[in-house]
Image (cartoon, rainbow, N blue to C red):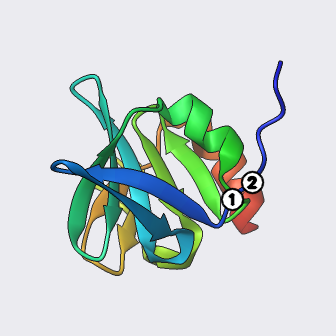
Amino acid sequence: MEQLVPTRFLTVRQEEDWKPLRLSTITHLESLHKKTWVYADGEAYSVSQPLKELQQRLPEDFVRIHRSFIVNLVAVERITRDLASNLIMVLEDGSELPVGQSYLADVKRILGM
């Protein structure tokens, strides 16, 4: 299998243009309706790669927390629980992302919880 090189940019699609986003501006990535979305600077951009492929290219600040989400830990403001005691990551932009049960142990280990 081809070794993917970590990058400092992720090139996204914005209408008919391509835009290189600095990784530091990305809060999270989401797989939704067979598309992958990248959220940065209050905007949502589509990319053609699936989350699994992007996860291999992103640096360690980006952690898979759910089958539908990868989060940039730098953008996490706090971690809380919902009514069912599931972990929720609250991001600087106000987004609330669930931590999936199958990713819970990994997330806790990475964050030292």
Name the one closer to the observer, 87 or 65: 65
* In contact (CB < 8 Å): disc 2 and disc 1: yes
- Label 1 environment density (alpha carbons within 10 Å; few <14, some 14–19, many ≥20): few
Q: Is residue 92 left or right of residue 62?
A: left
Residue 83 visible in this rendered orientation of the protein: no
Q: Is residue 90 above or below residue 54?
A: below
Q: Position of residue 53 (x, y in %)?
A: 60, 32
The residue under label 1 is 7
Which amino acid, mark 2?
Answer: Pro
| Crowding at mark 2 (Cα within 10 Å: few <14, some 14-19, many 20+) | few
The quadrant of the image that shows the N terminus is: top right
Compute the Cα span from label 2 to label 1. 4 Å
Closer-to-camera residue (82/51): 51
Residue 79 relative to residue 6: left or right: left
Amino acid on which the number 1 mark rests in the picture: Thr
The one nearer the camera, 110 or 40, is: 40
Q: Is residue 29 above or below residue 68?
A: below
Q: Residue at x 42, y 59 (%)?
A: 28
Q: Residue 6: which disc?
A: 2
The spot of residue 109 in percent (x, y) is 76, 55
User: Residue 8 at x, y = what percent?
Assistant: 64, 67
- Asked which secondary structure carries label 1, the reply is loop
Task: Work out which residue is located at the far left of the displayed protein and give it.
Answer: 15
Residue at 57% across, 64% down: 9
User: Quadrant location of the C terminus?
Assistant: bottom right
Q: How many marks?
A: 2
Q: Residue at x 44, y 76 (%)?
A: 25
Q: Position of residue 79 (x, y in %)?
A: 46, 70
Q: Residue at x 44, y 67 (%)?
A: 21
Mark 2, secondary structure of its residue: loop
